Amino acid sequence: MPLPIDSRIDLSRLPAHVGIIMDGNGRWAKKRFLPRLAGHREGVKAVDRVVSHASTMGIKALTLYSFSLENWSRPRDEVNALMEILAEYLERELSRILEVGIRFNTIGHVEDLPLFAQEWVSRAVAETADREGMILTLALSYSSRREIADAAQALAREAIAGKISPENIDESDIERNLYTSDLPELDLLIRTSGELRLSNYLLWQAAYAEMYFTDLYWPNFGERELESAVLAFQSRVRKFGLTEDQIAPPKV
């Protein structure tokens, strides 16, 4: 049974795009004397809760840091298990994603994934391509620094081909070559587990995003915690370099 949306949330002022660094699966498991894999599987349950509630709330885009480029350095057994969990998740949830109108998307170097995982990712992207609900993006084999480097390489190729002049390159040119070019501006970035860093995630996109940090491990994160983050977002004054008086001039 879906949880009702907190009445304090102003549904007309939702963050259009929410990114989440889902951290703490391993520590959640360790505190319970369980293997790390148990933490990752419990983390999938949190993904189910958050995806469903974000879609119900009307958030336009949700981007989850699922597997970083650096994560390939983890023990082989753990990496293999994570790839299997990814494929299992898509196999199990694809029909529900289709039913509620979610469009599935990825950013990162998906070609790095094993073929069985790539096949499920490609199938999910293709089968949900015409859906008009929330865009659910998984960052897979993702590195923000590599994303920016890839954008720079694309612009260099354009310059060599004479399609663009180097001195005319501006922020919009970089942005149109980022993996997230078809997503709304990132409004809210959430990180769980008490860590206070971005860990090479959406560095360019986070320039003016509101940050929300919680000590909760990812498996403990759910609908109410997502709402707490949204309420925190709605309580802040987003100035974008301006003064508060410029944003809301004092009443005469």
Image (spheres, rainbow, N blue to C red):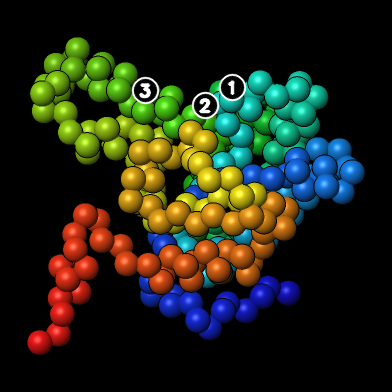
Q: Is residue 221 above or below residue 197?
A: below
List the residue tagged with mark 3.
149
Residue 30, by quadrant, is top right
Quick check: 170 left or right of 137?
A: left
Residue at 37%, 43% in the rendered image: 205
Instruction: Give the SS element for disc 1.
Output: helix
Quarter occupied by the C terminus: bottom left
User: Marks 3 and 1: CB-CB under 8 Å?
Assistant: no
Which residue is pictured at 33% across the width and 45% down the height? 207
Residue 112: image tag: 1
Q: Residues within 10 Å of mark 3 (few under 14, many from 20)?
A: some
Asked if labels 1 and 2 touch by Cβ distance under 8 angstroms, the answer is yes
Residue at 15% from the left image edge and 68% from the top image edge: 246
Which residue type carries mark 2?
His
Q: Secondary structure at mark 2?
A: loop
The x, y position of residue 93, in whole percent, is 70, 51
Q: Residues within 10 Å of mark 2 (few under 14, many from 20)?
A: some
Label 3, label 2: how many angstroms apart (C-alpha)?
A: 13 Å
Chain-order first, disc 3 or disc 1: 1
Nearer to the camera, 50 or 24: 24
Callout 3 secondary element: helix
- Of marks 3 and 2, which one's residue comes earlier in the chain? 2
Q: Which mark, by number, is residue 109?
A: 2
Mark 3 is on which residue type?
Ala
Work out whether 115 lies above or below 174: above
Residue under the point 72% across and 49% down: 43
Q: Measure the alpha-carbon separation of dots 3 and 1.
A: 17 Å
Q: Relative to residue 8, is residue 160 depicted above or below?
A: above
The amino acid at mark 1 is: Asp
Q: Where residue 105 sits in the image (x, y, percent)? A: 51, 43
Is residue 77 positioned above or below 38 on the image?
A: above
Does residue 12 appear to the left or right of 86 in the view shown?
A: left
